[in-house]
Image (cartoon, helix red, strand yellow):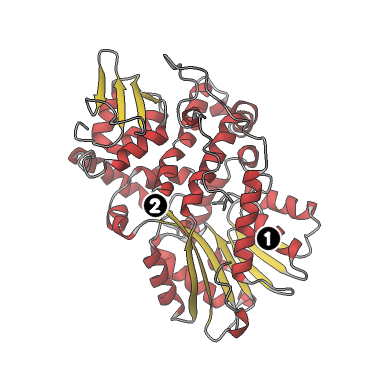
Amino acid sequence: MRRSTKGCFRVLTYRNIYIFPANGPADDSERVAELRVVDEVFWLRLCAMGDLGFAEAYMYGNVECDDLVSLFHIFLDNREQLDNLDSSMSYLFTIPQKLTSYRFLNTIGNSRSNISAHYDISNEMFAGFLSEDMTYSCAIFEDLDGDLISGTDFGRFSGGHGLTRLNSSTTNVPNILSDDTLFHAQMRKLHHIIRKAKIMPGHRVLEIGSGWGSMAILITQTIPDTTVDTLTLSVEQQNLARQRVKAAGLQDRINVHLMDYRDMPEDWKGAFDRMVSIEMIENVGQEFMTTYWATIDWALKKKNAVGVVQVITIPEARFERYIREIDFIRKWASFLFIFPGGFLPTLTFLLHTLQTGTSGRLTVDSVSNIGPHYARTLREWRKRFLHVYETKIVPALQKQYPEVMSGPRGREEIEVFKRKWICNCYCEVGFSTRTLGDHIISFTREGNEEYGCDTFE
């Protein structure tokens, strides 16, 4: 750590204060973060498991941090100097992680349990921090970093909540729920995908990955005579999506199916004009990506069909290490938006498996990356999550898991759960630095003249 050259962070223990680099920040523009070691087991976790060990130590209260976002930025800015942070000992810990991960392979038999492990937490919990449309994916903001108001202490939403700050004045805490910025950003993204798919009146649309129905509802509300068959493997999602569809009076045009994409009925072959899928591909699994594309090819009409997918990706340079090791993003970020058994592809991997799975019968039309918008999306979710944690999230957890969350160690489990979600700071930094991406890909049948060319949509 003494070799770090960018930014500055302090490590406070019961006996010493360590500053890296030793001479402090080069100037006032440098990022600064502070760690407070609460339990010496922090060092064991860090040395044994590297970044994953740090995340677990934070979750279990072994260490406090006043600003995880700044800390992760410092680590990434100094990544070349910190390549040896993961000791050789950490490799030993990846072996059992790899062995246990095989039980999460996304066979048809495992997929439903994998997805339920994520989305069947509680509809009430997700409703507590999502915008009113209940869209759980990257939004597109009119102003990418418009929430980063000068003078606001965002460390209070990035790990520093509840920490006493010495020698600091009262900070500005913005009104978290003062506007509908997140809702409008989510609607902007959904409309963007609808335009890229060029969904027209009368079209039958296949959606793989229902969420809580926001895309299906928007399609049928805004485009006459459209119908949507949307698939989910989460019972919780299906129940709430059906309620929302009925409340919108769209139950005759939207069918929410509890169905694996590989189990579509035979009469759906070649039945769909359009296909959309928002941040579901990450949960297909590396072994089944070609099957996924082949199934889409099977379901779409043989002429003039169009599809659009949105998918979280990793850079090409990180791919080999990603599939070889179990790092924090692979293990713990699965709790945020990737199911057990999930897999983050590269753009090249997506395009290669698309070509292989469809034998070239679907042609890529456009590719764009909205990944930097995910950084703000995660900030917006995290601020809302912390704002309503005690009033909405905790009651929802206690209702669904009374033996755990209301038991003798209930408050401890509740705190661990909260810290686990706060760790999305790691992913926020990943998206803002393009260590993670979020690509929107549109594709169509060869010879589709009616599709047009809306380059800037």
**Badge 2 amino acid:** Arg
Label 1 residue SS:
helix
User: Is label 2 in contact with label 1 (beta carbons under 8 Å)?
Assistant: no
Label 2 residue SS:
loop
| Above or below, comparing residue 261 to residue 203 in the picture | above
Q: Nearer the viewer, residue 358 or 179?
A: 179
**Left or right: 410, with 188 as reference point:** left
Which residue corresponds to the image point at 23% horizontal and 29% vertical from the top-left?
21
Which residue corresponds to the image point at 60% horizontal and 63% vertical from the top-left?
193
User: Residue 289: which quarter of the image?
Assistant: bottom left
Counting labels gives 2
Q: Position of residue 97 (x, y in %)?
A: 32, 45
The residue tagged 1 is: 216
Question: Local crowd at mark 1 within 10 Å, few (<14), some, or many (≥20)?
Answer: many
Please report whichever mark, 2 or 1, sits nearer to the chain's N-terminal start: 1
**Left or right: 18, with 362 as reference point:** left
**Badge 1 amino acid:** Ala
- Specify the label residue 434 is tagged with: 2
Q: Position of residue 241 (x, y in %)?
A: 69, 52
User: Residue 300: which quarter of the image?
Assistant: bottom right
| Above or below, comparing residue 63 to residue 133 in the picture | above
Q: Nearer the viewer, residue 59 or 308?
A: 308
- Name the quarter where the C terminus is drawn: bottom right
Q: Position of residue 284 (x, y in %)?
A: 46, 60
Which residue corresponds to the image point at 30% horizontal and 55% vertical from the top-left?
318
Q: Which residue lies most toward the right here?
A: 249
